Image (cartoon, rainbow, N blue to C red):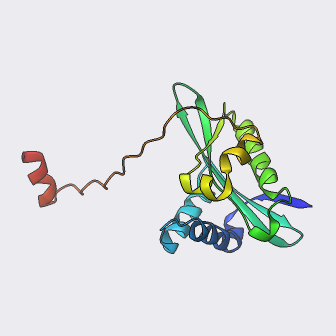
C-alpha cells in the first residue's frame, strides 16, 4: 500500500536523493547544491509543499507543488515535479502523489492545478496521456520563458554606467 506524507526538514535527506535522481534521469543540468537549496525553500515556504511516497518503509516517489495568485484563476497551483522510482512505477504511486497534491491544493482554496510536460518527458514517458488519464486537460496555451539575470547591487559602477547610458 502507498503511504503519502507531507515532507518536513526531518525528511530532507530521504527526499533529496529522489529529486537528484529525477533530474539526472530526465537530463536536467541542475547543480546538486541548487536542488538541495530549492528543496529547503519549498519545504519551508507556506505557498508550496513537498510530498513523499513510501511502499512499506521504502521511499519510492516525490512530488512538489507551488502556488501563485493571478487575475484569471485566483489562487492556482503547479505540480512542479513528480518522480517515481522505476521499480515502483505502475503501482499507483504517481496517482497517490497527484491525489495528495490535489488535496493540498483544494484545502488552500486553489481553483486549479497545472502541470508542464516537457518535450523530453512526452517522448520518453508519454506524459500527456498519463496526466490526461488523471483529469488534466491540455489548455492550448504555450508556455514561454525569459530567464532573468540578478539585479546588480546598488552602488556598483556597473549599475551607475547602465543607468547613465
What is the number of callouts on the image? 0
Q: Quadrant of residue 152?
A: bottom left
Residue found at the very far left of the displayed protein:
165
Q: Residue visible at 12% across and 46% down?
A: 163
Relative to 33, residue 153 above or below: above
Q: Position of residue 75 (x, y in %)?
A: 60, 33
For the residue pair 147 and 74, the one nearer the viewer reads as 147
42 on left or right of 126: left
Q: Residue visible at 84% across and 55% down?
A: 92
In which quadrant is the N terminus drawn?
bottom right
For the residue pair 140 and 61, the one nearer the viewer reads as 140
38 on left or right of 54: left
Q: Position of residue 85 (x, y in %)?
A: 74, 68
Q: Residue visible at 57% across and 71% down?
A: 24
Residue found at the very far front of the displayed protein:
123
Q: Position of residue 7 (x, y in %)?
A: 72, 61
Q: Residue visible at 63% across and 72% down?
A: 21
Relative to 89, residue 133 above or below: above
Q: Position of residue 118 (x, y in %)?
A: 55, 51
46 on left or right of 96: left
Q: Quadrant of residue 111?
A: top right
Residue found at the very far top of the displayed protein:
72
Relative to 5, residue 55 above or below: below
For the residue pair 76 and 135, the one nearer the viewer reads as 135
Amino acid at each position: 500500500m502507498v503511504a503519502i506524507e507531507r515532507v518536513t526538514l526531518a525528511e530532507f535527506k530521504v527526499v533529496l536523493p529522489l529529486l537528484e535522481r529525477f533530474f539526472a534521469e530526465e537530463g536536467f543540468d541542475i547543480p546538486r547544491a541548487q536542488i538541495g537549496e530549492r528543496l529547503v525553500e519549498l519545504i519551508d515556504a507556506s505557498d508550496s509543499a513537498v510530498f513523499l511516497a513510501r511502499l512499506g518503509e521504502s521511499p519510492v516517489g516525490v512530488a512538489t507543488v507551488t502556488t501563485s495568485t493571478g487575475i484569471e484563476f485566483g489562487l492556482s497551483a503547479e505540480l512542479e515535479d513528480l518522480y517515481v522510482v522505476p521499480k515502483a512505477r505502475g503501482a499507483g504511486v504517481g496517482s497517490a502523489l497527484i491525489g495528495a497534491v490535489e488535496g493540498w491544493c483544494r484545502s488552500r482554496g486553489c481553483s486549479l492545478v497545472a502541470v508542464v510536460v516537457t518535450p523530453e518527458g512526452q517522448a520518453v514517458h508519454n506524459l500527456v496521456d498519463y496526466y490526461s488519464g488523471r483529469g488534466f486537460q491540455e489548455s492550448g496555451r504555450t508556455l514561454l520563458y525569459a530567464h532573468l539575470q540578478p539585479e546588480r547591487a546598488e552602488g556598483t559602477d556597473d549599475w551607475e554606467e547602465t543607468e547613465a547610458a
